Amino acid sequence: ETVVHEDNGEDIPEEFDARKRWPKCESIGEIREQSACGSCWAVSSASAMSDRVCIASNQKNQLRISASDLMSCCSKCGGGCGGGDIDKPWEYWRTDGIVSGGGYNSSVGCKPYPFPVCDHHINGSFNPCQGRYPTPPCETVCDKNSKLDYKKDKHYGKSAYTLPQDIRQYQLEIMKNGPVVSSFTMFHDFLSYKSGVYIHNTDHRCGLHAVRIIGWGVENKLPYWLVTNSWNERWGDKGLFKVLRG
């Protein structure tokens, strides 16, 4: 279902950053790590879900929704580490629920992320992300180090919807309910992004990528979306990037 926000032509601020609007929701500022796994769809969705749980609770609930549980157990969402959909996770969250889980080795929640940090398209201090991990099987128990009960730890979304492809609608949604997930065609020059407003200038495509939009602004007269990637904090601008708004 597509939700269209009532638009009374109200002024939308030139700049908006969900981290500043909801400063107690720590998940908004966190950069997750998908590792050598095509799980950007699950990682971005789990991040935005965590943000929205906190925002809806008046910045009290610091739950981390598990990207691992979503990636392994939502079979209709796609192929786990082989890539997936960005709409179906929200429907799955509403109907089946998702357990809690933080980053790799974090001991946070029922199912923390299973794969370690690696370097994405940079020469850094970690091993480069090589190959692709197999998708972990869907296990309906929490990690052995967790004291939580899987069934009791299921958290559910209230509703699931998509937005029309319209800048103002995205902005109204983010201001009201928090970060959103979007996908875009990734071009080869995106991989080496460092700062500024990214505008692709190559035709070398390298697939679709799902990300989380946390705000917008204007830099050097260029309107941009403020976006978090899932390639850890060493990639890009501390894990974030700005992309031409459009």
Image: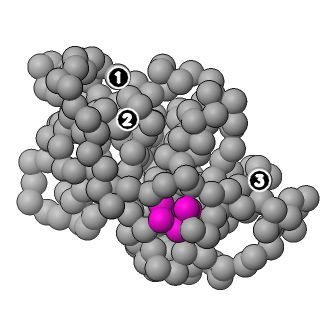
- Residue 116 lies, with reference to residue 30, above or below; the image says below
Tally of numbered discs: 3
Spatial separation of the CA atoms under disc 3 and disc 2? 26 Å
Task: State the extent of the magenta-drawn residues as a range.
Answer: 89-94
Disc number for residue 16? 1
Disc number for residue 109? 3
Can residue 65 be seen in this snapshot? yes
Q: Amino acid at mark 2?
A: Ile
Q: Disc 2 vs disc 1: Cβ atoms closer than 8 Å?
A: yes
Disc number for residue 169? none
Using the rendered view, name the quadrant where residue 237 is placed: top left
Q: Amino acid at mark 3?
A: Gly
Quarter holding the C terminus? top left
Q: Which-is-in-front pick, marks 3 and 2?
A: 2
Check disc 2 and report the residue beneath it. Answer: 174
Using the rendered view, name the quadrant where residue 118 is placed: bottom right
Residue 56 x/y as whole percent: 57, 36
- Left or right: 188 as drawn, with respect to 96: left
Which structural element holds mark 2? helix
Q: Nearer the viewer, residue 245 or 235?
A: 245
Residue 148 x/y as whole percent: 86, 59
Residue drawn at x 54%, y 49% as measured from the top left: 49
Quarter holding the N terminus? bottom left
Q: Nearer the viewer, residue 139 or 236?
A: 139
Mark 1 Cα shell of 10 Å, populated few (<14), some (14-19), many (≥20): some
Q: Amino acid at mark 1?
A: Phe
Which structural element holds mark 3? loop
Magenta stretch secondary structure, dominant: helix
Mark 2 Cα shell of 10 Å, populated few (<14), some (14-19), many (≥20): many
Mark 3 Cα shell of 10 Å, populated few (<14), some (14-19), many (≥20): many
Spatial separation of the CA atoms under disc 3 and disc 1? 30 Å
Residue drawn at x 17%, y 24% as measured from the top left: 9
